[in-house]
Amino acid sequence: MELTKKPTPKSTLIFGAAGHIGRPLAEYLTREAPDIPTFACRQKHRKVENTAEQVSRGRVLAADYEDLSSFAAAVKGVEGVFVISSSGMSENVAITNLTTVLKQDGSAVQVIRLLERILDGSGLPVTYINCGASIIDNLWLQIQPVLLNKTFICTEHRVPFLDPQDIAEVAGHLSLSDNAKHIGAFHTMNNGHNWLTYEEVAGILGDELGERLPLTEAMGLHGVLGP
């Protein structure tokens, strides 16, 4: 193969497929490359229905991320790997074990890692992607106090936002690309369009909830929440 090209993975394994990025990635790969098997890997203690098995045609693998033999069975023969941390996961142990089993198996042609450069020095063909914006649906993590106080509390400023599906599509494009320049690269994602004020964000949340949500500056918290 030419030095400017990399192999396109003939199979892809998604760690963190239960999340808001892993699931749309599975959907994207299944839609754009239906002949390339896409597997969702879940931790053994998690329920199957919380993973992306519906869109990966039932291909769900369970692995104990702290057990090398279990991990090795999950990655056996897999060429493409997408890694995103999931809640409750001991990341240092899991990523160390993942590095070990991928190097032992030797099949991986590209590992795409969201955020931390924890795979530096692993010798694996890694592509890093970094979200240079806030993820829009993380706003729902703040929704309970918003509903309670009928106001959106934040210091007014502009923030870039990205949808998880955009992040998943970037990862999918990188996986299916044959451009070798992506190996070892660190790509920061920002669509340059959704540069919103928190007044605008409050309007979006209000539209979703069907009621007007005024923005209250964070410095006014005392007046809203009391002493």
Image (cartoon, rainbow, N blue to C red):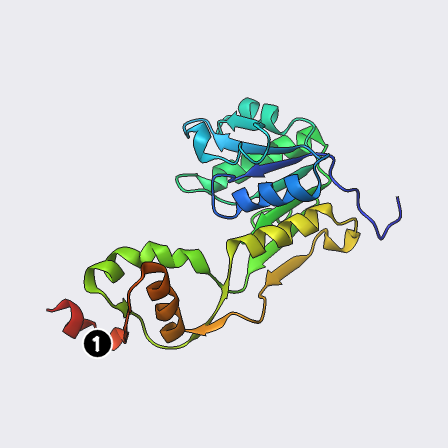
Up/down of 50 relative to 135, above or below: above
> Percent position (x, y) of residue 24?
55, 46
Residue at image coords 72%, 46%: 176
Q: Which residue lies furthest to the right in this view?
A: 2
Q: In this view, does 128 lie to the left or right of 87?
A: right
User: Residue 92 location in percent, x, y?
Assistant: 49, 41
**Quarter-of-image position of residue 77:** top right
Q: Name the quarter where the C terminus is drawn.
A: bottom left
Say which amino acid is labelled 1: Gly
Q: How crowded is mark 1: few (under 14 residues within 10 Å), some or many (20 or more)?
A: few
Q: Quadrant of the N terminus?
A: top right
Report the residue marked by disc 1: 220
- Point 43% across, 39% down: residue: 89
Q: Is residue 221 above or below residue 16?
A: below
In the image, residue 47 sits, relative to residue 159, either above or below, namely: above
Residue drawn at (58%, 71%), measured in percent from left and top?
192
